[in-house]
Image (cartoon, rainbow, N blue to C red):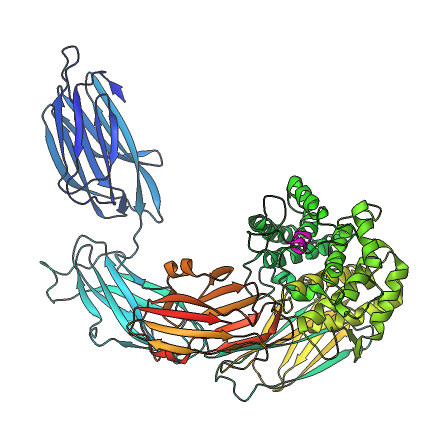
Amino acid sequence: MQGLQCPGKNFEIVLLGLSLSLHVGILGHNGLGGLFFSFSHGSSWRCSDFPVAGCVLCRVYMVAIPAVIQAGSEAKLCASLLQPNETLVMTISLMADGQNKTLLHETSDQEFHRCFQFQAPHVKSDEVQNFKVEVRGVTFLSTEERRVMIKPYGPMTFIQTDKPIYNPGQTEHFELKATVFNYLSKCIMVSVTPALSSDYTLTPVRDVQDSSSCLCANGRKTFSWTMAPSVLGVLNVSVSAAAVQSHAACGNGVVNVPERGRVDTVTRSLLVKAEGTEKSHTYNWLLCPTGEALTEEVEVQLPQNVVDGSARISLSVLGDILGRALNNLDGLLQMPYGCGEQNMALLSPNIYILEYLRNTKQLTPAILDKATKFLTSGYQRQLNYKNADGAYSTFGQGLGNTWLTAFVLRSFGKAQSFIYVDPATMEQSKTWLERQQGKHGCFRTLGKLLNNRMKGGVTDEVTLTAYITASMLELNMSVSDPVVDHSLSCLKNSTSDMSNTYATALLAYTFTLAGDMETRARLLQHLDTISFQEGGLLHWSQSSSETSPSLEVEISSYVLLASLSASSRSTSDLGYASRIVRWLVRQQNAYGGFSSTQDTVVALQALALYSTRVFSRGGASTVTVRSPSGERCLFHVNQNNKLLYQERALQDTEGKYSVEVKGSACASVQVVLHYNVPTPTRSTTLSIQVTPEVDCNINVIIPVYRYHGKELTTNMIIVDLKMLSGFSPDPDSLGRVSQVDRVDIKDDHVLMYLTELTSLFPFHITLDIIQELPVQNLKPAVVKIYDYYQPSKLLFLPPPLLRNLFSFTQTNLSYGYR
């Protein structure tokens, strides 16, 4: 701001009416410079004398222009000059790419207020241009610039659907809405037409039969249809709006048809899910031919109660057993990740896969970039679970957890070679962990062990100490370190009791890392005598009478780690390991993970070590898959594409498939069958009973009766409440949920975490849900409760009364657990 330095007048802007956010203004006078404000209807100003040394001056101007201007349109500009004391020249320009377009050049010594139209420039995409105002006199000069957005509103009308994604169950009907806006300054006649499709039917709602409507300046109108999907999966729904000629009365004048942007089409994705509960079966093979072709066959069958149209089957082939996990680094498990241990299950597999790729010189910049992003975000999230003393707790509060702290410490230590990890944080956690060591060498159990299988059958402290000691040895701490030496002494005194298979496998791995080959050999020899051997495959279970897929994977993985971690290995050791690997590969899920968090972490660590030990740069194979109908799928695997995820959708959901691999390279082949069944309601260890109470709000009481298992308490329990179609949880209600450790929302599910369930203490949870969209033929939502570490201990519950709630705007759900 330049000019005579005379305060002159007190200046006051009085805004009357409602402020418009689409306008900017430039206001200037001597000594104050340009003031920027939102312009409003009925604005006024007042200027009162303020004498200084006999000087009374007040030169005020104001210019208003829209902050966003439609390209090529007639835009409005208003300029005012108040009480000039000399002749002033006001110049208003629009500047872009070094070129000026003068919109106003006015010379006056009189007050004026003027509004006029100007032609906005044409642009192909959003473009920011500068709006410049210069007011010049003999003793006064003011220059101000503001930015304005020029937007190429291709269509003069556009459609906005009320929600981008719906999740209706099969056979549910719901309302699809499209809102048309007119940004022109004149009235238009708009015709709205949904695209035809064999995937769904659209029927206009009762009071909206006419697809054409008069729409005047800045007007809007909503059109509605009842939608009935006829297929499952992702559907694309398109609706078009067009400005059309019409002789019908529209506003106060003749219908206008713009030259540009007469038509707009909006497409939204719609996810249609099948009713019931989704199930999946995976069939995995690791086939390594050494001359003759290797073949496998599998009979794929659907259950009799499969939901019609829900079955789908796919085939994938890779040249590396870690390729599937690499392809799904952010989704190895389709399970919630709401606590500190579960977050580590996202972080740790990245480390083992990166180590394998680096050791085998397969690590590309693209893979490194993708994986380190996951590592960095996982590391930063994990710090939220760190206590002030360096320990880590399950939900970021409460007593530190010795097992979790060891898990974090070993993972952060390995991650240091790929991302930055604060050394002070590592040292603080290590110091805290060392303080938990007792006089006899074993570590004290602090914090809840959410997976009670970690407790083992010897003592809680022995199994925990084995895990912590293995973690320290993996971080290259010496066996002569006082803490490590003391813990190994404690563990060695406990090796005489081999009654617990989990503890024995973990001890075998720990003593392998410690280099105690005598103790290792004794433990592995015992494990070999109790192994399960069938068809050349090898694995272990906790006991012959108690089976748990996740526990079997974890035990077998520890044995594999013990077999491969010795400083010297024979060909027979690798042959023994390959039998375990082929069994482990058969347990993988469709995403490259396993049943739960710990089995996934330990198994991928073991598979990465095995892949490093047997890695070869040569070889190629051809994979041939034949379907029941005779379809033949051919895949090629070689050293250039061994990490490439090759997938194909198959047609036959039932019948016999055959797989043949010829060549000299290993091939990992997986067939995945997905389908839905009516929601089951039986469980051996958990039970739920629904007692509805209906009033103006709908109260659903869901008691979860006592845990029926052998243990005194469960592992961590997840309650998974799927929202009814058209409903969402009330955010305020989520904040009031008590007696659970954490509540998360993922897509249309509310996830509640319970540290454990016992048979002694019943409790209730109340949750409000709000209806956002009316849905006809509403299907029941499903409540699922399961043991996080043993998902096979699972109970589903469909609340039957919820299917008829679409007439209510708010519903109250109460859950009781005991």
Q: Which of 456 and 146 is in front in this view?
A: 456
Q: Which of 358 and 123 is in front in this view?
A: 358
Side of 164 where 481 appears, left or right: right
* Residue 183, quarter of the rendered image: bottom left
The residue positioned 50% from the left and 74% from the top of the image is 704
Q: In which quarter of the image is the N terminus?
A: top left
Query: Going by the picture, which residue comes out furthest to the top?
Result: 53
* Residue 533, quarter of the rendered image: bottom right
Residue range in magenta is 401-408
Q: Which of 715 and 776 is in front in this view?
A: 715
Residue 262 is situated, as x and y percent measured from the top left of the image, at: 26, 60
Side of 250 where 400 appears, left or right: right
Residue 680 is situated, as x and y percent measured from the top left of the image, at: 52, 82
Residue 599 is situated, as x and y percent measured from the top left of the image, at: 68, 65
Query: Going by the picture, which residue comes out furthest to the bottom?
Result: 304
Secondary structure predominantly adopted by residues drawn in magenta: helix
Side of 221 where 489 appears, left or right: right
The residue positioned 61% from the left and 64% from the top of the image is 332
Look at the picture and state if 89 lies above or below 413: above
Look at the picture and state if 459 lies above or below 706: above
Q: Residue 663: tell me if it is visible.
A: yes
The residue positioned 28% from the left and 72% from the top of the image is 696
Query: Does the magenta segment cover residue 140?
Result: no
Side of 527 where 117 appears, left or right: left
Query: Going by the picture, which residue comes out furthest to the front?
Result: 760
Q: Residue 172: tell me if it is visible.
A: no
Residue 403 is situated, as x and y percent measured from the top left of the image, at: 67, 56
The residue positioned 68% from the left and 56% from the top of the image is 445
Look at the picture and state if 301 lies above or below 119: below
Q: Which of 778 and 21 is in front in this view?
A: 778
Query: Does the magenta segment cover residue 405?
Result: yes
